[in-house]
Image: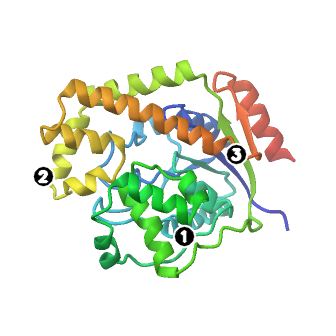
């Protein structure tokens, strides 16, 4: 029995994964599954770069707005939800397209890593409170270097979760690669550093112009705590600090731009280790679609 075929699109933040996924989906009558650890949350639209209905251009999207911002959406839950979406798409004889910047999710789905079904341990998390975020990252590097290489080292919530899993199981979760039930084409967006940096800065300004600060204010009004915002990624972290008076608007933009560049560099370092990624120039649309056709026809 032939394995169902899946296309994944990876690349650093602001490299154009969303637009490429929609272009491919339109070409092959596919459907997109978001692999983004923030876009799963309702109300986190601008800061997470969630695709708008207009941008979808009629392409069905999955795993958007499936959790409350105060919930902890785990990797094992993503695998469960994404697998259900894949099965549904394949039954409709369409091709699933996985796109998003949480490469840990993508690797879990590809069976490159294994998710541990561990419930939150709030007592253990409380024991981590005295540690600074850099200290948590150093601790994770000691316990599980591979997981540390794939994580946002500034995302305290994800660092705590990784350490929580190790603490609960008593050992580092097994990460031995297992055969995937799917046949994968993984496309990596190859973009120049100059263009990437320009994209990052433009995206920050564009998001601010359409109400990213107001979105964070609304989330706070709805009960999302400052600590939770700090764990939900760079945009929410630095805007929350701006709203708390810790940073001026210009300082917020400067730090957000710098940290986003750092994060993109870290993402590329992780992706370059994967020999299965087929790197493509996002401007060469015809060539990319040709690769997709060859994959689907094989």
Front residue of 166/35: it is 166
Disc 3 and disc 2: Cα gap in Å? 42 Å
Disc number lying in front (1 or 3):
3
- In this figure, which residue is indicated by the disc labeled 2? 221
On screen, residue 192 versus residue 38, left or right, reads right
Residue 215 seen in the figure: no
Q: Residue at x 33, y 54 (%)?
A: 231
| SS class, disc 3 | loop
Nearest the viewer among 198 and 272 is 272
Q: Dot 2 surroundings within 10 Å: few (below 14), some, or many (20 or more)?
A: few
For the residue carrying disc 3, how many other residues have a C-alpha within 10 Å: few (<14), some (14-19), or many (20+)?
few
Query: In the rendered image, which residue does mark 1 sit on?
Result: 80
Q: Can residue 268 be seen in this view?
A: yes
> Sequence-wise, which precedes: disc 2 or disc 1?
1
Which quadrant, please, contains the N terminus?
A: bottom right
- Residue under label 3, please give it: 273
What is the x, y in percent for residue 206? 33, 25
Please tell me whether mark 3 or mark 2 is closer to you in this view.
Answer: 3
């Amino acid at each position: 029995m032939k394995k169902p075929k899946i296309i994944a699109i990876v690349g650093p933040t602001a490299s154009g994964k969303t637009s490429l996924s929609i272009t491919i989906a339109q070409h092959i009558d596919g459907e997109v599954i978001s692999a983004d650890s923030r876009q799963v949350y309702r109300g986190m639209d601008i800061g997470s770069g969630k695709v708008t209905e207009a941008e979808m251009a009629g392409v069905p999207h999955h795993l958007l707005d499936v959790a409350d911002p105060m919930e902890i959406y785990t990797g094992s839950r993503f695998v469960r939800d994404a697998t259900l979406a894949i099965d549904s798409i394949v039954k409709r004889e369409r091709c699933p397209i996985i796109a998003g910047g949480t490469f840990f999710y993508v690797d879990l789905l590809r069976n490159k890593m294994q998710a541990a079904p561990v419930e939150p341990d709030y007592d253990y998390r409380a024991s981590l409170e005295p540690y600074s975020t850099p200290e948590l990252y150093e601790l994770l590097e000691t316990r599980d270097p591979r997981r540390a290489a794939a994580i946002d080292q500034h995302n305290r919530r994800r660092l705590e979760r990784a350490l929580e899993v190790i603490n609960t199981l008593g050992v580092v979760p097994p990460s031995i690669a297992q055969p995937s039930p799917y046949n994968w084409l993984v496309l990596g967006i190859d973009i120049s550093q100059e263009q990437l940096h320009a994209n990052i800065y433009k995206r920050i300004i564009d998001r601010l112009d359409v109400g990213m600060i107001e979105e964070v204010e609304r989330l706070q009004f709805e009960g999302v705590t400052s600590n939770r915002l700090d764990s939900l990624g760079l945009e929410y972290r630095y805007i929350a600090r701006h709203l708390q008076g810790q940073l001026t608007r210009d300082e917020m933009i400067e730090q957000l731009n710098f940290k986003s560049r750092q994060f993109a560099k870290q993402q590329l370092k992780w992706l370059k280790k994967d020999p299965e990624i087929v790197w493509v120039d996002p401007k060469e649309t015809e060539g990319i679609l040709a690769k997709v056709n060859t994959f689907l026809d094989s």
